[in-house]
Amino acid sequence: MPMGSVVEAANTGANGSLSEKKPVVVFVLGGPGSGKGTQCANIVEHFGYTHLSAGDLLRAEIKSGSENGTMIQNMIKEGKIVPSEVTIKLLQKAMHESGNDKFLIDGFPRNEENRAAFETVTKMEPEFVLFFDCSEEEMERRLLSRNQGREDDNIETIRKRFKVFLESSLPVIQYYESKGKVRKIDAAKPIAVVFEAVEAVFTPADEQKASA
Ligand code: UDP
Ligand code: MG
């Protein structure tokens, strides 16, 4: 095992230092404005996962004044995908620091290279992929009205983000689809209605029947 890989150590239970159990990872994917962050907050409340938004981790890295900050900021402003190495390091650090063994990884992997690098570096594979399916029209409406002070929520950058999503991120979803791992959610509905569908994905089948 390569040295210094905390997540891998957690995975194998090496040293008995972290959880002996293999961590559970769920990738939460969907276009910009499809509701990933909003629904992740609900999942955390009900199912005890730790929410790791790759975009939020990158924005925190900019704020921290790290040497990569300017590069990350420029890429986000252009809707481009930050090099895997940077994002994966931030994800590994956050997983380690959480002390939890169940993770929602939101907004990552965004391209084939992200996906392959994550698997190689962490030796982890997602339990499943939650895919928020939403029309561009609806996503654009949400992004332009959310007012979170994000530098990339302007129409020019939004168009670039949509293009990157279609060209680079959808193939990742198709890859997991071919492995039977995608749980697709109709994300164009109101928050509470979407969460009902999400809840069903996270609730074991036997419990669903019991409460029906
Ligand atoms: N980003 C990235 N790699 C990631 C996640 C995000 O490069 O793994 C960058 C990318 O430029 C993206 C921006 O961060 O457009 C915002 O991502 P976020 O997931 O926060 O936006 P969302 O899709 O949720 O609106
Ligand atoms: Mg987000």
Image (cartoon, rainbow, N blue to C red):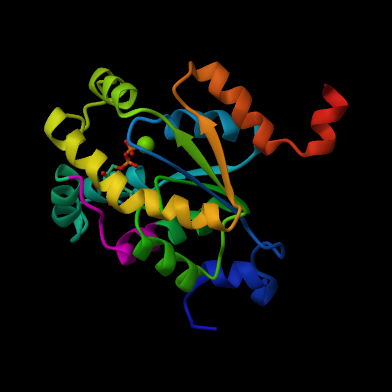
In the rendered picture of this protein, how many numbered marks are placed on residues? 0
Q: Quadrant of ligand 2?
A: top left
Residue at the extreme front: 178
State the residue at coordinates (59%, 52%): 181
State the residue at coordinates (54%, 57%): 178
Left or right: where 135 falls relative to 46? left
Residue 41 coordinates in the image, percent (x, y): 51, 31
Residues rendered magenta in the picture: 79-90
Which of the 4 image quarters holds residue 210? top right
Closest to the observer, 137 or 75: 137
Asked if residue 60 can be seen in this view, the reply is no
Left or right: where 84 falls relative to 75? right
Residue 48 coordinates in the image, percent (x, y): 64, 39
Q: In what quadrant of the picture does the C terminus appear?
A: top right
Reply above or below: 136 against 167: above
Closest to the observer, 47 or 127: 127
Residue at the extreme right: 210
State the residue at coordinates (45%, 28%): 38
Left or right: where 149 falls relative to 22? left
Residue 128 coordinates in the image, percent (x, y): 59, 50
Q: In what quadrant of the picture does the N terminus appear?
A: bottom right
Closest to the observer, 202 or 178: 178
Residue 154 coordinates in the image, percent (x, y): 16, 29
State the residue at coordinates (66%, 76%): 15
Does residue 198 belong to the magenta stretch?
no
Reply above or below: 149 against 13: above
Which of the 4 image quarters holds residue 17? bottom right
